[in-house]
Amino acid sequence: MSRGARYTARSMSTQAPPKQVSIQDFSAELRKFPQSAFDHTMEILQFLKHIAVSVDTLQPYLCWDRQHYTRNLIEKTPLFELIAICWEVGQASSVHNHREQNCWMLVPMGRLRVENFHLVSQDLDHGRCQLTPIPAVEMDATHPCAVDPRDPVHRVVNPKEYAERAVSLHIYSRPFDSCVVYAPEQGTCGVIQLHYTTMYGQSVG
């Protein structure tokens, strides 16, 4: 199995359509998981493969900006945080990691591409790194994704050719407020602070 294949929940087998739930019920289901479920990726990924969040119930958490994707906090507990990210056509994240925390993503609206990288070397003190690309995967309403802890560096892209807005839900196994971002072409890296655009449906700042 290739490294890229480990990131995706795609399956060639036929399965029942995911169960549609509200974002409130989705959050409630996440709160039922024990701490151990957030220490690895498979248990929650299996849950995501059989559930879908109704876009209508996400409306209080959707915020759009033509200049940059937006990060909208829905729920935060000691075990996880749940964020809705809104992507205009052509927007993309930086290449980044998740501070050694697990991450799951699902896309209730539109579709997105996850471009993955293998981190060959990193020297944060001097801001230098070396990365090599590994296969990308596509996410949509029926194909969630778990970031592989062995190769966690990636970026999320809403390519212009997809020609539609997208919304992704991100579950992080423990909340964190900074991450390492990478410029693969320049071989540079550094730590940035993370910020929310909205929190619990209210604008920040």
Image (spheres, helix red, strand yellow):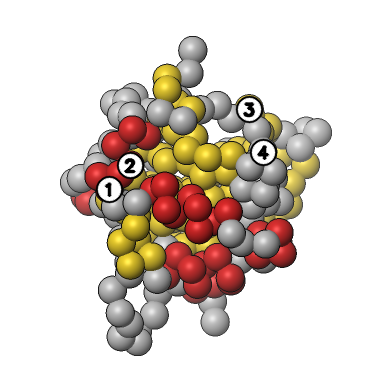
Instruction: Give neighbour class at mark 3: few <14, some 14-19, many 20+ (Cα, 10 Å).
Output: few
- The image quarter containing residue 57 is top left
User: CA separation, marks 1 and 4?
Assistant: 26 Å
| Amino acid at circle 1 | Val
Element type at marker 2? Answer: helix
Q: Which mark is residue 193?
A: 3
| Amino acid at circle 4 | Phe
User: CA separation, marks 3 and 2?
Assistant: 26 Å
User: Is 26 placed above or below 5 here?
Assistant: above
Identify the residue at image location x=53%, y=40%.
Answer: 75
> Residue 42 in the image: x percent, y percent?
58, 71
Which residue is denoted by mark 1 in the rendering?
55
| Amino acid at circle 3 | Gln
| Amino acid at circle 2 | Leu
Kindly indicate whether the residue at mark 4 contacts the one at mark 2 (C-beta within 8 angstroms).
no
Identify the residue at image location x=49%, y=35%.
Answer: 73
Which residue is denoted by mark 4 in the rendering?
176
Which of marks 4 and 1 precedes in the sequence?
1
> Residue 170 in the image: x percent, y percent?
49, 48
Q: Can residue 181 be seen in this view?
A: yes
User: CA separation, marks 2 and 4?
Assistant: 23 Å
Kindly indicate whether the residue at mark 2 contacts the one at mark 1 (C-beta within 8 angstroms).
yes
Element type at marker 3? Answer: strand
Identify the residue at image location x=48%, y=28%.
Answer: 199
Kindly indicate whether the residue at mark 2 contacts the one at mark 3 (C-beta within 8 angstroms).
no
User: Is 108 placed above or below 190 here?
Assistant: below
Which of marks 1 and 3 precedes in the sequence?
1
Kindly indicate whether the residue at mark 4 contacts the one at mark 1 (C-beta within 8 angstroms).
no
Q: Which mark is residue 58?
A: 2
Instruction: Give neighbour class at mark 2: few <14, some 14-19, many 20+ (Cα, 10 Å).
Output: some
Which image quadrant: the N terminus? bottom right
